Image (cartoon, grey):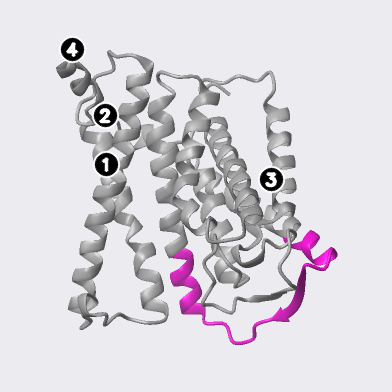
Amino acid sequence: MKKSIIYNLSPFNNNMDMSVTEYIIKKLLAFVLIYCFSAVLSEGIIIGILYCMGYDPFHGVMPVGLIGELLPYYGFMIFSLVTFAYCRFVEKRTIKSIGFSGNIVDYLAGALLAIILLFIIISISCIFGSMIFSGFNTNVNIKSLILWILAFGIQGATEEIMCRGFLLKSLQKRISIPIAIMIISTVFVFPHLFSLLEANFVYAIVGIINLYLISIIFSILVLWRANIWIACGLHSIWNFILYGIMGLSLSGSESISKGVILFSVKGANMLNGAEYGIEASIITTIVLGLFLFVILKRRKGRINKNGI
């Protein structure tokens, strides 16, 4: 009996003949395994690259500025490759089944959604005086912007590959779509908890709600379009605009870039999310909540092959 349970829960086989609970645990263990192995591998590769560049990370000799900021984001490529390898060799799935199918134009649609949502959120923040438009940066480093958009393209796509391409696609084989989405959203929220808990309790709660909302939106868009292009575009461009174009805090991380469009945050309040940024703003909660309501309303009564 114990051997059977251990075999069922092992992430290294593609067996599906087990209870739903065992199946969920098995896939969550696989996700943790992929994440931890990728983190160790990417860290090792980055350390190796730093040594080749003449740095000594084990003795605190690290690059500062742009290089030091970019390397961890480019390290996300390892997470994607490990996830692809697991899906291919363990789950016997193709890249197409992970979600890289359909029309790549959906990526641009996701990018446009990011622009629209952020425009609405920032505009409302400015109207209520929690943020102030300060003009434009006339000394923009184009090379830096290109490197950042590539970095966030990799980071955003990787999170979607792991959460929606691997875990959601795997879970929906055995459990209902709503339960699968909530499990994915909890997994999506967890890595952000450490930075959120450094903020004031109220901002942390609002930030967690917003993370659940955006994760649910990502999942529904992926299921609706039957690919992950749209979520990759929305996720990556949202991060890039906040951090690179506006120079604002992203998930509690203060941008080292001044940005292109300059905004100043007026005080610390629920409208601007304080030091965590607009992702812990009540305005973001309302905008994302309304957007989720709209897409759910539009999909009501229209069930496709993906269950939504």
Amino acid type of the residue that numbered disc 3 sits on in the rendered structure: Leu
Q: Secondary structure at mark 2?
A: loop
Label 2, label 4: how many angstroms apart (C-alpha)? 24 Å
Q: Which mark is residue 91?
A: 2
Amino acid type of the residue that numbered disc 2 sits on in the rendered structure: Glu
Q: Considering only order in the chain, which callout, 1 or 2, is on the residue closer to the N terminus?
A: 1
The residue where tag 4 is placed is: 1
Residue found at x 25% / y 38%:
86
Q: Which mark is in front, 3 or 2?
A: 3
Q: What is the crowding at mark 2: few (fewer than 14 residues within 10 Å), some, or many (at least 20)?
A: some
Q: Quadrant of the N terminus?
A: top left
Q: Considering only order in the chain, which callout, 2 or 3, is on the residue closer to the N terminus?
A: 2
> Quick check: 240 above or below 92?
below
Q: Secondary structure at mark 3?
A: helix
- Residue 297 location, x and y as percent? 73, 28
The residue where tag 3 is placed is: 288
Q: Which mark is residue 33?
A: 1
Are dots 3 and 1 in contact, CB under 8 Å? no
Label 2, label 1: how many angstroms apart (C-alpha)? 14 Å
Q: Which residues are magenta?
A: 122-150
> Quick check: 39 above or below 294?
below
Q: Quadrant of the C terminus?
A: top right
Label 1, label 4: how many angstroms apart (C-alpha)? 24 Å
**162 left or right of 223?**
left
Residue found at x 73% / y 58%:
270
